[in-house]
Image (cartoon, rainbow, N blue to C red):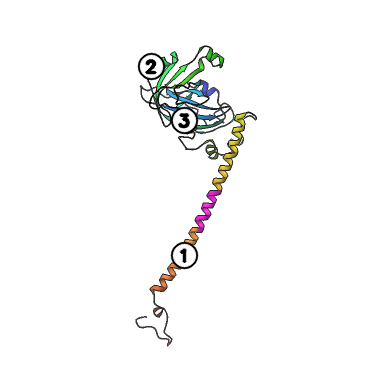
């Protein structure tokens, strides 16, 4: 698939997403992986693995689970360019419009040797070494009635955590919801962007996600306004403090000068004569 499908779905004159090129193939090594939390038509997590110069990508509606008994649906989507793995921000109107957060990143290695063969077979065992996701995992293509019932066909996979020291019943998406890149949430990401971009690119009205998106935009605007007010207050407080310090320093300097020079040395005597030693 490479990047043809990725490029076909985007207008790079409008989106800040990288256009990307296929990177040169490299020998077996630790490769990049990331998980991007994406608020678009639906809130989901994009699971991406570097392979053959691109990012293999799966959309995971409920996000990864550390519980080996939980099998998370992962829908195979188009490959993405390597540069996309560090992307965090707002995508304008069009395919994938919404907010992207870099939720996790790190490296991965294959436990099955030949990655292409494992993908063809539909059984890719891998080890993740990220900030939030670690240890042994498997991506399994479902096929059969399970996939057809969801309209996925060959695109329908399951992301499952293997039992190891990194497994558990902790809901990692709830426990660690923020970005590993900026330590921000969706509101913070929006607050750092030009309002002219995200105010004009709201999703279609209606639906739970649309309501969520609108709420986030409003909170982001309030957050940005609060930051602006805080910055203004800090500037004013700094000026007041500086002016106060200058006034105090001036007063101290004057007092010190008075103490350092006796009155008898600073003026003539009543008789009009200068004190002894004063020229």
Between marks 1 and 3 in the image, the one whose residue lies nearer the viewer: 3
In what element is the residue under mark 2? loop
Dot 2 or dot 1, earlier in sequence = 2
Dot 1 or dot 3, earlier in sequence = 3
Residue range of the region highlighted in magenta in the rendering: 229-240
Q: Nearer the viewer, residue 64 or 230?
A: 64
Identify the residue at image location x=47%, y=62%.
246
Residue 154 at least partly seen = yes
Q: Nearer the viewer, residue 123 or 197?
A: 123
How many other residues sit within 10 Å of disc 2, few (<14), some (14-19) or many (≥20)?
Answer: few
Mark 1, residue position = 248
Q: Position of residue 120 (x, y in %)?
A: 44, 14
Spatial separation of the CA atoms under disc 2 and disc 1: 74 Å
Mark 2, residue position = 114
Residue 172, numbered label? 3
In what element is the residue under mark 1? helix
Residue 113, numbered label? none
């Amino acid at each position: 698939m490479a990047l043809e499908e990725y490029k076909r779905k985007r207008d790079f004159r409008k989106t800040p997403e990288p256009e990307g090129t296929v990177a040169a193939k490299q020998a077996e090594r630790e490769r990049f992986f990331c998980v991007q939390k994406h608020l678009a038509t639906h809130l989901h997590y994009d699971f991406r693995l570097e392979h053959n110069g691109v990012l293999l990508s799966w959309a995971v509606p409920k996000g990864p689970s550390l519980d080996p008994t939980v099998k998370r649906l992962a829908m195979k989507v188009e490959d993405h360019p390597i540069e996309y793995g560090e992307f965090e921000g707002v995508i304008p109107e069009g395919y994938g419009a919404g907010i992207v957060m870099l939720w996790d990143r790190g490296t991965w290695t294959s436990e099955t040797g030949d990655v292409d063969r494992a993908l063809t077979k539909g059984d890719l065992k891998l080890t993740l070494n990220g900030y939030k996701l670690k240890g042994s995992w498997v991506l399994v293509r479902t096929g059969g009635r399970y996939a057809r019932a969801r309209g996925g066909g060959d695109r329908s996979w399951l992301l499952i955590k293997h039992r190891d020291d990194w497994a558990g019943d902790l809901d990692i998406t709830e426990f660690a919801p923020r970005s590993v890149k900026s330590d921000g949430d969706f509101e913070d990401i929006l607050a750092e962007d030009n309002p002219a971009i995200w105010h004009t690119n709201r999703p279609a009205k209606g639906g739970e996600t649309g309501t969520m998106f609108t709420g986030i935009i409003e909170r982001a605007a309030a957050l940005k306004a609060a930051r602006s007010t805080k910055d203004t207050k800090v500037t004013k407080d700094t000026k007041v403090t500086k002016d106060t310090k200058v006034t105090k320093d001036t007063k101290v300097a004057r007092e010190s000068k008075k103490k350092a020079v006796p009155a008898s040395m600073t003026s003539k005597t009543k008789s009009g004569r200068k004190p002894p030693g004063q020229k």
